[in-house]
Amino acid sequence: MMPYAHITGWGMAVPERVLTNLDLAAMIETDNEWIVSRTGISERRIAADGETSASLAAEAALKALEVARLKPANLDLIIVSTSSPEYIFPATACLVQDQIGATKAGAFDLSAACTGFIFALNMATQAIRAGSIHNALVIGSETLSRIVNWQDRGTCILFGDGAGAFVLQASEEPGGLISAVMRSDGSGGELLIIPGGGSRYPASEKTVREGLHYIQMNGREVFRFATRVMTQATEEALEKAKLKIEDVKLLIPHQANQRIIETAARNLEIPMERVVLNVGRYGNTSTASIPIATCEAIQDGRLTPGDRLVFVGFGAGLTWGAAVAIWTGSFPTKRRVRPARYRLLARLRSLLLRLVRRLEGLIWGNG
Ligand code: COA
């Protein structure tokens, strides 16, 4: 029988530093009222100097593993969805694999912007359902504050930093992620883009001077696209799962803009009490927003095992998608795991591996 992929662990990590709309108004020509009325955002988190997409991802991941009571060494797969990776390569997922000591996991990054977490969730689910792996870690992590143009009031007011993670585990019990849709339309690629730093416009003095390494966006077009596809994707995913919107306990949408979410909820005819909304406190954390919103919904006691929920997102690409899940909660059986200990062990292991590599280089030569 095909195993099911259950969400058995969850965790989030956000930087401590809060940047309010008032702080922004002191930096650029904007005001709190404008931002709140157009977006619903009041504040966002900004990564400190030492914090990166990998460090936030690792923190969220260890919390998720603690909830799932799963040792990092038992992970088969790590997918990090991010639009602000640490490097073009190596993958941020490999840095996380090293930082948490997931010694047997394959790790790669997935690039689908704000829809990335849904795509990653579906990829990990399919790997579990096919029977090729048992335990997967799916992370959405962003430090968008590093790639936003702080002079551009049309974009810098929107984004924030943070990470969220899910552990997915195989089980014969029906449940977990039961349907998903993934869509894209590259003809709208230029509507939300970082043009510089890739192979088309490699980083140069000119690309930096022209600000091509920053997020560029056509806000109105993205707004129109978003309200349309959120409804469409949710309906398609529900149809695949043979469910109706009335069956859904919680809709967990990508947190980009309160008005987009409210419009989608109205079109879907789901009351806002059944929609998770926290964009006001974190801004748009891109691919991290859905797992962060999920963690907060759990914290607030809004999900119990057996509940049906829908994740829905949209973003650059253009990409959009939705997934339907039956909430499981953590498997109750295993002993506690201690994340801090694994982090320390992972650090020692990483140092040892680097040392061995250096010694081998001395013995065998570098050429
Ligand atoms: N503060 C004050 N005024 C601002 C401003 C700011 N931060 N940003 C833009 N304005 C001004 C504009 O200059 C414009 O003034 P003008 O009419 O004198 O030219 C006016 O406000 C309206 O600008 P516009 O861009 O049409 O605003 P909007 O109502 O479309 O709202 C967004 C802008 C960005 C909030 C909105 O388009 C949006 O949320 N789009 C979706 C973006 C998104 O979700 N992206 C992420 C996808 S994953």
Image: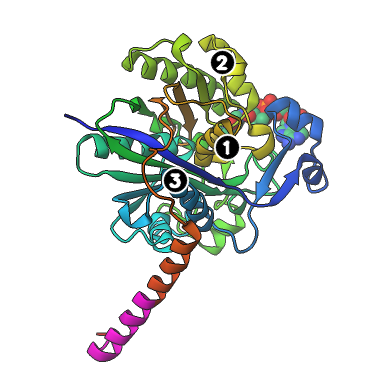
Which of the 4 image quarters holds residue 179?
Answer: top left
Q: Residue furthest left?
A: 1
Q: Secondary structure at mark 3?
A: strand
Asked if the residue at tag 1 contacts the one at tag 2, i.e. Cβ–Cβ closer than 8 Å, the answer is no
Q: Secondary structure at mark 2?
A: helix
Which of the 4 image quarters holds residue 97?
Answer: bottom left
The answer to whether any part of residue 92 appears in the image is yes
Q: Amino acid at mark 1?
A: Met
**Classed neighbour count for the residue bearing mark 3: other residues with Cα under 10 Å, few (<14), some (14–19), many (≥20):** many
Horizontal side of residue 228 vs 172, given as left or right: right
Indicate the quadrant containing the C terminus: top left, top right, bottom left or bottom right. bottom left
Horizontal side of residue 264 vs 36, given as left or right: left
The answer to whether any part of residue 218 appears in the image is no
Q: What residue is pinned by disc 2?
A: 265
Closer to the N terminus: mark 3 or mark 1? Answer: 3
Horizontal side of residue 173 vs 198, given as left or right: left
Q: Residue at x 44, y 26 (%)?
A: 305
Closer to the N terminus: mark 2 or mark 1? Answer: 1
Q: Is residue 134 above or below residue 351?
A: above
Asked if the residue at tag 1 contacts the one at tag 3, i.e. Cβ–Cβ closer than 8 Å, the answer is no
Q: Secondary structure at mark 1?
A: strand
Q: Is residue 142 above or below residue 275?
A: below
Region rendered in magenta:
352-365
Q: What residue is pinned by disc 1?
A: 217
Foreground mark, 2 or 1, reads: 2
Dominant SS in magenta: helix
Q: Is residue 244 above or below residue 168?
A: above
**In x, y percent, where is residue 250?**
51, 21
Q: Is residue 16 above or below residue 352?
A: above
